[in-house]
Structures are given as structure tokens and as C-alpha cells.
Image (tube, rainbow, N blue to C red):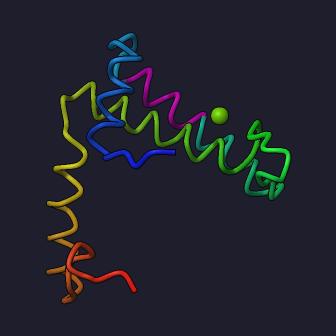
Amino acid sequence: MKDIKISDLQRLIKTLDNGNGTTEEYFYKLTEEVGELSKAIRKNIRLDKTDNIKGTIEEELYDVLCYVFCIANSYNINLEQCMYMKEKLNAEKYNRKSIFDIEEE
Ligand SMILES: [Mg+2]
């Protein structure tokens, strides 16, 4: 596996998806995927040693993430830029360091 930036993943999903859906369609798909995630969580279906991701919490989390990117792409929103802006706001709101200033231990 290689490390990938949020902006790279968003761009790759945009290339793959090629703007085939409307914002409304992506939003409906997102809510469908949230429903699938809900079911996987309720049944606690996890990825196991067989590496079969189908129907697992792991699969549905990634599906949700993909549709979040599709919605962002439909508005030409750069989610990586949003991440930095929102984390700065969160740090101010909760009077703490930015998560990007916290050293990993
Ligand atoms: Mg799914």
C-alpha cells in the first residue's frame, strides 16, 4: 500500500466518476451508504482474515467516504483545504492545539 493524500484520492475519484451524477444523486447515494453502514455496525460485520470486505463496516465506511468526495467534487470543493481550515477553527473553538501541531508519539 502507498500513502495517499486526501487531495489525491479526491482527484482520482473525480477522474473515475467523471461527473456522472448530480449533487442530489450523490447525496441520495451517500444516505444509502450510511444505511448500509448502519446495518454493518448493527450486525458488527468486520473484515476478517479472509480479506473479504463485502458487507463489512470497513467497506461501508469507504463507500460513505467516496460519496462525500463526489459531493465535494460536484461543488468543486477542495476537501483537503477544508480539513486544514476546519481543524484551525476546531482548535480555536476547543482551545487546543491543531491536530496538525500534535506530535505523534
Ligand atoms: Mg455500500
The secondary structure that dominates the magenta segment is helix
Q: Which residues are magenta?
A: 24-32
Q: Is residue 104 above or below residue 1?
A: below
Q: Quadrant of the C terminus?
A: bottom left
Image coordinates for residue 13, horizontal then vertical, percent: 39, 26
Write the residue at 40% across / 39% down: 68
Write the residue at 82% across / 53% down: 48
Q: Is residue 80 above or below residue 26?
A: below
Write the residue at 45% across / 45% down: 2
Image coordinates for residue 23, horizontal then vertical, percent: 34, 24
Left or right of 39? Residue 84 is: left
In the rendered image, which quarter is residue 59 located in?
top right
Q: Nearer the viewer, residue 98 or 52?
A: 52
Image coordinates for residue 50, horizontal then vertical, percent: 85, 45
- Total of numbered circles in the picture? 0
Write the residue at 75% across / 49% down: 40
Left or right of 27? Residue 96 is: left
Image coordinates for residue 99, horizontal then vertical, percent: 27, 75
